[in-house]
Image: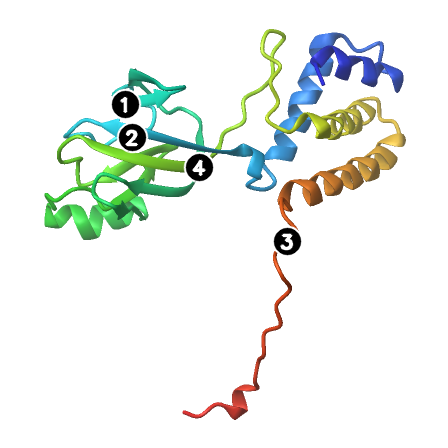
């Protein structure tokens, strides 16, 4: 569904007096409300990249080499990481371990480790590794993306197109609230119902796993 289609649907519910910039603002607010509720599968992304020796900052650092659509791109930067699902050093077959920044400072930096990195941590919204990369290293990062607001020139919503109506319902709730219209409550219910439909669809990609019955015993029967 394109922005013009969303505008048209909002106008069908009586909001033709809102200009496009106002409708876009409400649509983006609804979009952010939706995609920040859960780590949605459609927000996931995986990238492989090579980091030069001596590097500590991984994201928002234009020193990466990536292969995108079978093309090698240099001086690249990862800028859309919201939360990490998996971070792996595939050169040394190491699963990177997340740590709090203060733990790195108090427990590891004092030891001045010099091996290849085993830990990663966040400073603000950027990923760092410790210790610094030793030798050119390739990593695989699996993460949940940070949503970006739609604009008149870039109207990409990461929500699957079949569920774009939930964005419109969310925007309509906000539009009714702007007008202090009691219909906001009714549209809030419609939004939540449509949201639940999207949730059921997005989180269940397969139904072929067999049912399992787990046998549990009471703890009083355990032998210590």
Q: Which of the 4 image quarters holds residue 22? A: top right
How many angstroms separate mark 1 from mark 2 (CA)? Answer: 8 Å
Point out which mark residue 195 bears: none
Q: Which of the 4 image quarters holds residue 129? A: top left
User: Quadrant of the image for the N terminus?
Assistant: top right
Point out which mark residue 143 bears: 4
Q: Earlier in the sequence, mark 3 or mark 2?
A: 2
Badge 4 marks a residue whose secondary structure is strand
Could you say where residue 116 lies in the image, as x and y percent from the top left? 16, 42
Residue hosting label 3: 208
Q: Earlier in the sequence, mark 2 or mark 4?
A: 2
Badge 3 marks a residue whose secondary structure is loop
Number of other residues with Cα within 10 Å of mark 3, as a class: few under 14, some 14 to 19, many 20 or more: few
Q: Are marks 1 and 2 in contact (CB under 8 Å)?
A: yes
User: Quadrant of the image for the C terminus?
Assistant: bottom left
Residue hosting label 1: 64
Q: Residue at x 77, y 40 (%)?
A: 192
How many angstroms separate mark 4 from mark 1 (CA)? Answer: 17 Å
């Amino acid at each position: 569904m394109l922005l013009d289609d969303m505008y048209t649907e909002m106008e069908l519910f009586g909001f033709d007096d809102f200009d496009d910039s106002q409708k876009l603002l409400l649509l983006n607010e609804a979009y952010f409300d939706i995609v920040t509720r859960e780590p949605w599968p459609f927000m996931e992304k995986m990238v492989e990249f090579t980091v030069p020796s001596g590097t500590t900052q991984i994201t928002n650092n234009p020193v990466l080499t990536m292969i995108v659509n079978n093309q090698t791109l240099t001086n690249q930067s990862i800028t859309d990481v919201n939360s990490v699902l998996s971070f792996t050093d595939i050169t040394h077959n190491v699963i990177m371990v997340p740590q709090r920044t203060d733990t790195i400072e108090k427990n590891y930096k004092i030891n001045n480790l010099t091996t290849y990195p085993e830990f990663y941590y966040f400073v603000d919204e950027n990923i760092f590794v410790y210790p610094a990369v030793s030798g050119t290293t390739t990593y695989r990062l699996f993460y949940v993306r940070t949503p970006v607001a739609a604009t008149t020139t870039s109207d990409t919503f990461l929500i699957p197109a079949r569920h774009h109506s939930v964005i419109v319902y969310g925007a309509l709730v906000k539009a009714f609230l702007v007008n202090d219209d009691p219909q906001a409550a009714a549209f809030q219910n419609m939004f939540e119902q449509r949201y639940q439909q999207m949730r059921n669809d997005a989180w269940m990609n397969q139904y072929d796993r067999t049912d399992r019955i787990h046998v549990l015993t009471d703890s009083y029967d355990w032998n210590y």
